[in-house]
Amino acid sequence: MTLKELVPGDAAELLSLQHRLDEESSFMLLEPDERQTGLQQVTEMIESFAKAETSILIGAVADGRLAGYLSVSGGSLSRNKHSAYIVIGILADYQGMGIGSGLFREMESWATGVGIVRLELTVMTHNDRAVSLYTKRGFEIEGIKKKSLKVSGNWVDEYYMSKILSN
């Protein structure tokens, strides 16, 4: 596995990965038919992440293709630029192989370097594999968002989790 910061040339592969994740996982936010972004929008998103001081897109390449990614969206204002929100997605065939831990290690090293102190994310309470990864990486549950999502007609609660990197 190789980790790399995604660049505009990776847009088509990232878009394809996102569509596959939408199809194979009910743990991602979007339903399979809801993603409306095209190649140009994904290219522009990657460019905007590259320009932002407190945001990054990290890809995990395995078997010659993008197998997962982690996005970090940091604040841009004086009061919140120390804080960043994380989204991660890894194809089912590549889960349990250390890709998630690798993405988190890479992200935390980068975050410390740019002055991010607080990392935060949400995760469905029944996503045991993800909760285990986040807890292993030092994230703590701060609270529960009741009826946060509706998946396949059922209400789903989410944990709000965070990790403080330094003071």
Image (tube, grey):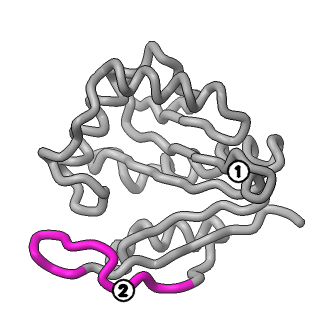
Q: Position of residue 125 (x, y in %)?
A: 37, 79
Q: Where is residue 98 in the image (x, y as percent from the top left)?
A: 50, 51
The amino acid on which the numbered mark 1 sits, given as a three-letter code, is Glu
The image quadrant that residue 52 belongs to is top right
Residue 27 seen by the camera: yes
Which sits earlier in the primary sequence, circle 2 or circle 1? 1
The residue indicated by pointer 1 is 108
* SS under mark 2: strand
Left or right: residue 151 compared with residue 102 = left
> What residue is shown at x 34% (from left), y 81% (from top)?
157
Label 1 neighbourhood size at 10 Å, few (<14), some (14-19), many (20+)? Answer: some
Give yes or no for residue 144 being in the magenta stretch.
yes
The disc placed on residue 149 is: none
**How many numbered badges does the structure rendering display?**
2
The residue indicated by pointer 2 is 146
Residue 63 seen by the camera: no
> What residue is shown at x 56% (from left), y 28% (from top)?
48
Q: Where is residue 139 in the image (x, y as percent from the top left)?
A: 62, 71
> What residue is shown at x 78% (from left), y 62% (from top)?
165
The image quadrant that residue 63 belongs to is top left
The amino acid on which the numbered mark 2 sits, given as a three-letter code, is Lys
Pick the front one: 62 or 74: 74
Q: How far apart are marks 2 and 1 (CA)?
A: 29 Å
